[in-house]
Amino acid sequence: MNGLFNISEALSIAMHLCLQLARQPDDYCSTRQIADEFGFSVHHVAKVVQKLVRGGLVQTVRGVQGGARLAADPGEVTLLAITEALGEAPSRGCLLDPSVCTGANCLLGREIREQNARMRAVMGRTTLQAVAASLKHEFKRPPTCNPRRGKRAS
């Protein structure tokens, strides 16, 4: 059975990309490295990076030695912030067209709103740092991004 929580490919790319960057906060990763690492289209990764830059979560440097890195400390970036940067915050009510269901007497509206509120709360308190720390115990493979420019200024 498939999971009940489904996310778009763009959000999957964003989550994987941000987690990879969180594992190497001082290094720049190219869109090609991220695409190759996870099997995503390099063009789709580039579009996602643009959205994350506009959302203030990622910064980029152009050129051969360029790439992307987190714009903030991984302990400050939440899964909800990534979701919102992509414009994909969970819906807040009934999935039916408003012409069919106005919401006032919706059979599932309240339950959907409550579950979405719970998911938003979990995503809002789950940071990249916390997820990356849990991954260190599960994956022995080191991150693939290469050191690019110097260390982040303190």
Image (tube, rainbow, N blue to C red):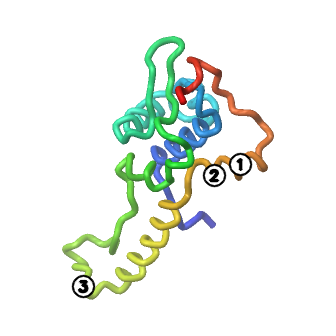
Quick one: label 3 or label 2, which is nearer the N terminus? 3
Task: Give the image location of residue 113, x and y in percent.
Answer: 38, 76
**Number of other residues with Cα within 10 Å of mark 3, as a class: few under 14, some 14 to 19, many 20 or more:** few
Quick one: label 1 or label 3, which is nearer the N terminus? 3
Cα separation between marks 3 and 2: 38 Å
Whether label 2 touches label 1, CB < 8 Å: yes
According to the image, label 3 marks what residue? 104
Residue shown at 38%/33% (left/top)? 50
Number of the front mark, 1 or 3: 1
Quadrant (top left, top right, bottom left, bottom right) of the N terminus: bottom right
According to the image, label 2 marks what residue? 131
SS at mark 2?
helix
- Within the image, what quadrant is residue 152 found in? top right
Quadrant (top left, top right, bottom left, bottom right) of the C terminus: top right
Q: Amino acid at mark 3?
A: Ala
Q: Amino acid at mark 2?
A: Val
Residues 153 and 31: in front is: 153
Q: Is residue 87 left or right of residue 22?
A: left
Cα separation between marks 2 and 1: 6 Å
Task: Give the image location of residue 5, x and y in percent.
Answer: 52, 64
Residue shown at 50%/48% (left/top)? 77
According to the image, label 1 marks what residue? 135
